[in-house]
């Protein structure tokens, strides 16, 4: 009984740690915490020990709520990264436009210009 509840409590603790990591942008560490949290949750649900259903349900509800918060933060981070990539792409196009001027070469040549003179 204590094992199941202990594993669920560890999963909750890891979920809170994961949320903090997402808030500061530490995606790799948050990913590792999420994998551990999933492992602990699966392990807890596979145990055959007799447990108070109300205790397990309470912890699963907390995990569900925490998962909603994690998903919200991950979506915010994804939107931020997408916007950053869009800005970077626009900057790249803009800098590429300056390339011809920086080299001193004309952007367009006219083959009909008479060079006799």
Image: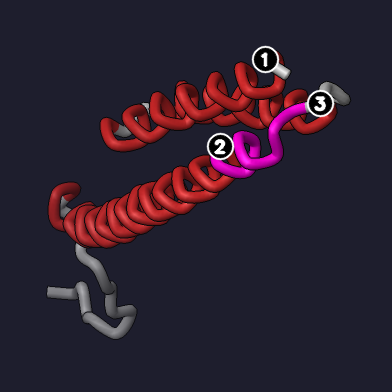
* Cα distance between the residues tagged 3 and 2: 16 Å
| Residue picked out by circle 3 | 50
Q: Which mark is residue 17?
A: none
Q: What is the x, y in percent for residue 61?
A: 54, 47
Residue 104 seen by the camera = yes
Residue 67 in the figure: left or right of residue 116:
right
Residue 56 within the magenta-colored segment of the rendering: yes
Q: What is the x, y in percent for residue 82?
A: 37, 56
Q: Residue at x 14, y 49 (%)?
A: 102
> Which of marks 1 and 2 precedes in the sequence?
1
| Residue picked out by circle 2 | 59
Which image quarter holds the N terminus? top right
| Residue picked out by circle 1 | 2
Which residue range is magenta in the image? 51-58
Q: Residue at x 33, y 79 (%)?
A: 111
Q: Residue at x 45, y 43 (%)?
A: 66
């Amino acid at each position: 009984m204590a094992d199941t509840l202990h594993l669920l409590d560890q999963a909750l603790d890891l979920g809170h740690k994961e949320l903090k990591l997402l808030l500061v942008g530490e995606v790799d560490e948050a990913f590792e915490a999420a994998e551990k949290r999933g492992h602990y949750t699966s392990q807890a649900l596979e145990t055959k020990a007799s447990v108070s259903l109300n205790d397990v349900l309470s912890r699963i509800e907390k995990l569900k709520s925490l998962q909603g918060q994690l998903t919200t933060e991950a979506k915010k981070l994804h939107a931020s990264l997408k916007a950053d990539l869009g800005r970077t792409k626009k900057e790249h196009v803009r800098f590429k436009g300056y390339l011809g001027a920086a080299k001193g070469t004309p952007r367009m040549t006219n083959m009909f210009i008479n060079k006799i003179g």
